[in-house]
Image (tube, grey):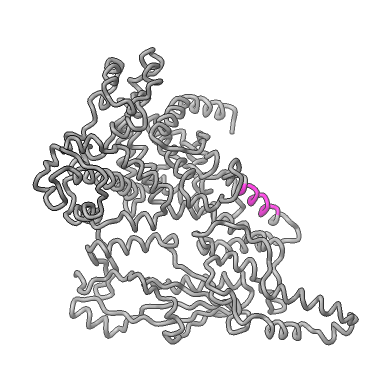
Amino acid sequence: MSETDRFRKQAIATDLEEPVVEARNLAEKLGLEPYPVNYWIVDYDEMNELIAYGGFQNRYPHWRWGMQYDKQQKQGQYGGGKAFEIVNNDNPAHAFLQESNTVADQKAVITHVEAHSDFFANNEWFGLFTEGRAEDDAVDAAAMLERHARAIGEYMADPDVDRAEVEKWVDHALTLEDNIDQHRVFERRLDVDGPERDLDEDLAEKLDELGFSEEVRAEVFTDEWIEALEAEEAPTNFPEKPQKDLLAFVREHGKQFDEESGKAVEMAEWQRDVLDMMRAEAYYFAAQKMTKVMNEGWAAYWESTMMSDEAFAGADEFLNYADHMAKVLASPGLNPYSLGMELWEYVENRTNRREVLEHLLRVEGISWRNLDDVVDFEAVREALEPPAAIRSIGPESLDALEEVPEEYVDREALEAAREGEVDVEAYPWKVLSYEGLARRHYSLVTPQHRGFLSRVSQNELERIGRYLFDDARYASVEEALDHVDFTAGWDRMFDVRESHNDVTFLDEFLTREFITANDYFTYEYSKATGGFHVASTDPEDVKKKLLLQFTNFGKPTIAVYDGNYDNAGELLLGHQYNGVMLDLGQARETLKRVFELWGRPVNLLTIVKEVDEHDVEVAKRRNREPEPEERGKLLRYDGEEVTVEDVPWEAVEHLAADDVDYDTKPEEWLA
């Protein structure tokens, strides 16, 4: 970077000092607790490079980064997409802003980043990677990735190691980067202590005790004899239960195939080291993959709250910001920003509605049976409107804040505003407390959600009423509403943000009400028509289908079932089948990669759906989808060819999901 560029970027960064400081102040006032964030200004090419590197400046040498850089660059040039920022999960976090952004865009991404950083710092799934470490060293991902980059670079530069072999070994490891046990706390698995390693050490000790000469050892205790003894004494199968962490398993028990001898030999030290580094990185990035909808929705929600509701975007910037947000939320396909934001708003609204209903059902003479008849929901909504003194704040209205409840006002900031030390024109939120901001932004009275309270179903009313603790009674609706907790919605959001991942988040909040209100449906490919059709509008089908896309990062779940299959040292993997079959072409290629990490034949049990061609023709005539038959298959790669054979259902029955029906096809195909 030239001196001119450096000083220009420093000047741009200086212009953003106030938005950065005030965005953090507003975020904390709203209840967020983000990591510290360092902001950097980068140009277009640097942004594409950072995106290709997953948000970091240093990664290990590999062709994948160039491929991702090229993809990102073409997307920007021809796809109409624009990268506004990228932020990484680190403490402190680092956010990179593109220098070509407008001021409105920069403010938007700064508020977006503050919310991301809060999510990184407080979501328990991110804590699985850092659990057990010192608090002041909670996250140091940049340093870890830089160490890995340096180590792999040194292996590639080592004259005793073939650079191409290192890159190929990384390729093999990356095949399994999503085959980890992402629900467990990350632990480095440094000791290679498999049964074969233990046997080798025990045998060596026994030979030493017998005192045989080297000549006798060479003639009697041949490699063939030792291998036969190992095969005889090794445990018939291991692990004791299926292991999802394939990277750990092949690192501990795998070997490499030596083409000259045609046998499996021990991995080199660098090979195990590379596997260990790839596994650590896979665990680090797992939380981001597991919370994509939650995290992006969370950032979009608080960005909107700050930029729109609190006018962090100035009057001359708002239209630019509105265009920015519209493009983000309108992106085609399964959009994590819009789905996530809608679900967070639903969490807030549903919590606030329940809070109000619980108070109304404690009013004398009101029960879940007659609430719809005796309560005027429009009058209730009007009563929930925030006081005028909170709704509109300016220098001339500060005295009016004396009339609102004490907990709504930040007294110290209010006095500073009266002294002219706080610019309430630009930052009215400074004179309010968290409770005051929650009251100011109460979701049930906003234009887009004002009918949410009255849309309560009779089933929900009954559920609330039947299990309501009778710990308070009110003489009137007015008295009941005076006791409503206006922070309930936000408080619930913070609790959910802490404990959930995308699967649990969708499972709990993707309700029939939400799906119906948003007109969600499923679609599938029809073998009968050769095209895609609406498969179902049933909320349960929609939920199952969507959950399936987020289970195990949307990838097949594969586990190790036997590390000594057929008592021959072969690896047996099992596909935990949930109604969606493997792409057998990809499965074949993956087995070839795994073979390189195991050094011996690799087997894979799976379940496939097969349809008879005659059944397809009959289905076409009857305008319905043919009924497939599920069968067991065993794929095997021995280093030369992949074979596929049928196996009896009993051999794969344990792989089939029996507690969740993932088949979303309705009885009659909707042609």
Residue 146 in magenta stretch: yes
Q: Residue placed at 68% from the left, 63% from the top? A: 191
User: In this picture, is 365 found above or below 486?
Assistant: below
- In which quadrant will I find the N terminus? top right
Q: Residue placed at 44% from the left, 67% from the top? A: 556
User: In this picture, is 354 found above or below 640?
Assistant: above
Residue that protrudes farthest toward the left in the picture: 373
Q: Please count the marks in the image.
A: 0
- In which quadrant will I find the C terminus? bottom left
- The magenta segment is 144-154
Relative to the observer, which residue lies in front, 110 or 347? 347
Left or right, residue 650 beside residue 147: left
State the image quarter where residue 163 is shown.
bottom right
Relative to the observer, which residue lies in front, 144 or 233? 233
User: In this picture, is 69 found above or below 436?
Assistant: below
Left or right, residue 306 beside residue 458: right
The x and y percentages for residue 579 are 36, 72
The x and y percentages for residue 462 are 19, 55
User: In this picture, is 547 found above or below 403?
Assistant: below
Q: Residue placed at 63% from the left, 50% from the top? A: 149
The x and y percentages for residue 339 are 32, 50
The x and y percentages for residue 393 are 29, 22
Q: Is residue 474 visible?
A: yes
Q: Main secondary structure of the magenta part?
A: helix
Q: Residue placed at 57% from the left, 69% from the top? A: 593
Left or right, residue 113 beside residue 138: left
Residue 343 in magenta stretch: no
Q: Is residue 49 visible?
A: no
Left or right, residue 561 beside residue 512: right
Relative to the observer, which residue lies in front, 199 or 602? 199
